[in-house]
Amino acid sequence: MEAYLVAIAIVAAIYVLLALGLNLQYGLTGIINFGHVGFFCVGAYTAALLAEKGWPPLLSFSAAAALAMLAAWPMGLISLKLREDYFAIVSLGFSEVVRLVVTSEKWLTSGVQGITGIPKLFGGLATGLPNSLAVLAVLVAVNLLAIAAMRRIVTSPFGRTIEAIRDNEEAVKALGKDPAAFKIQVLMLGAALAGVAGAFYAHYIGYISPDQFIPLVTFQIWMAIIMGGVGRISGALAGTFILMLFLEGSRFLRDIMPFISEVEMASVRLGVVGLALVLFTLYRPTGLMGDFTRK
Amino acid sequence: MTLLVENITKAYGGQVVVDHASLRVDTGGMVGLIGPNGAGKSTFFSLVTGFIEGEGGAMTLDDRAIGSLSPQARAQAGMVRTFQVPREYTHLTVRENLMAAAPGQAGDSLLNVFFRPGRVAEEEKALAIRVEEAIAFLRLGAVADTPAGMLSGGQKKLVELGRALMTGAKLILLDEPFAGVNPVLIEELSERIRELNARGIAFLIIEHDLGALSRLVPMLYVMDRGRIIASGAPADVLADPLVREAYLGGTT
């Protein structure tokens, strides 16, 4: 049971990193990024491939963040000139392109077979609980660092300007600031977080393949920040917690409803999350922690 | 700062909205632009401030051609507009709205935020003092910590004026500053504009409220169906039969 809880905590911590980045992009800046999983994917593959080459984790994780950031840059340049709804479509397309590239470039990524045998972090420690706990500790530390950085941003003039962009981009232009410059930075920062999350994911699961990086992952993160409260750091945390509760909690539904098969259960899980989302938007549209409309 | 607009034109699918319009605002001047609904006044503003692109004509700001500059660049050059429907930063407080408008802040760079927090904090302190002055000047003290989205229409116009002030603009373009504002606040707003003008800030004001505007500006342009049909002192312009016909619909 402990091993199970630690395992969930690790996945949750990875999701929190993704949620923090998306919250910065959408909650604070108003960028509708439907391609978050693309950066997650770039990070995961970068870390996995470099680990194969024997790079030490510190370097491979930095490279994962840097490459995810680099992927965000041209996309930002091209598409931040677009209206926000068009950007949403472009970003969704971007993440699908990443997935297709990873699927087809077999010489690099072994295509649909994926990359197996990605070494665990802290391979020196005994496998099982000690190893998982060490990974969790590092993840928590990285999350705390990310949260501290977010807090610094939110309370800074930069944070004020990106919130101004979210509230009224035309007015920001009219007053002489260039929204695109801010949005590109925000996009890259969120991508870097997703890249790091991907690196942790690859090393923890030990096996990555293209079908783990479908748009559903992006939308799960969206669900998390909507349920938790858009535009709030605590919302990203609370939302991820609720999401994990539903995704994992519904596993135990089988104990009380044994007539549902394992395959059906996957669909039931999605249904439960969907229902929760509908209930949240109906009865608590500002999310669990409230959103930016109630500062 | 002198704004010179010559023969600018804009058409939407054959429908000419602004038709070879010319206009001049001198340094420290105060100019009004009136016209019936749909005369093309707001489109004219958007052309001058770069929010839409026109066809032909020329625009200069202190002899510098601005026709191909982005809206941001034109604002940085010292010409800032407000909007007919106020575009306040809804979720930011009045104070934050004004703080966010200040140009060239070190804290607008992420690198400075993380690696030079001392400098950012220092600038913020200096900026806060300027913002408090602006808030006091605009009599917005009572709502300084209220999210701007919750203000009345008139207060939002004041916030927009305050933001324009914070940019250090030399020429402010006001798009219907009196629309949807109660009469008491109209007088307030006029008084603030007069004081700012006395400090050397030029204004170009689109307005529907003829009375308030003609008391405020010494120079008036009249636009009808995209063309400037008259200009001069308010009393003369309003006595012009052409203007009376176009704008007042022949009422005497």
Image (cartoon, coloured by chain):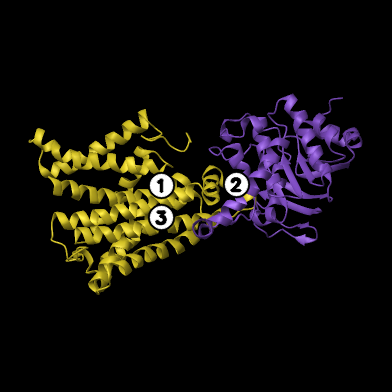
Foreground label between 2 and 1: 2
Q: CA distance from mark 2 to mark 1?
A: 21 Å
Q: Up-down: is A276 above or below A17?
A: above
Residue at (67% x, 44% y) in the render = B129
Q: Position of residue B20 (x, y in %)?
A: 78, 51
User: Mark 3: few, some, or many residues within 10 Å (few <14, many ≥20)?
Assistant: many
Disc 2 residue type (three-letter): Ala
Q: Amino acid at mark 1?
A: Asn
Q: Which residue is mark 1?
A: A23
* Rendering quarter of residue B35: top right
Disc 1 is placed on an element classified as helix
Horizontal side of B142 relative to A200 (left or right) equals: right
Whether residue B168 is situated above or below residue A60 in the rendered picture: above
Q: Are marks 2 and 1 on the same chain?
A: no
**Residue shown at 63% from the left, 44% from the top:** B128
For the residue labelled by badge 2, is the local secondary structure a helix, a strand or a loop? helix
Question: Is B22 placed left or right of A245 in the picture?
Answer: right
Residue under label 3: A190
Q: Position of residue B225 (x, y in %)?
A: 75, 41
Q: Nearer the viewer, residue B205 or A199?
A: A199
Circle on res. B83: none
Chain letter for yellow? A
Q: Sequence order check: which comes first, mark 3 or mark 1?
A: 1
Q: CA distance from mark 3 to mark 1?
A: 8 Å
Which residue position holds label 2? Answer: B100
Q: Nearer the viewer, residue A149 or A224?
A: A149
Q: Secondary structure at mark 3?
A: helix
Q: Which tint was used for chain B? A: purple
Image coordinates of residue A135 in percent, x first then y, are 23, 57
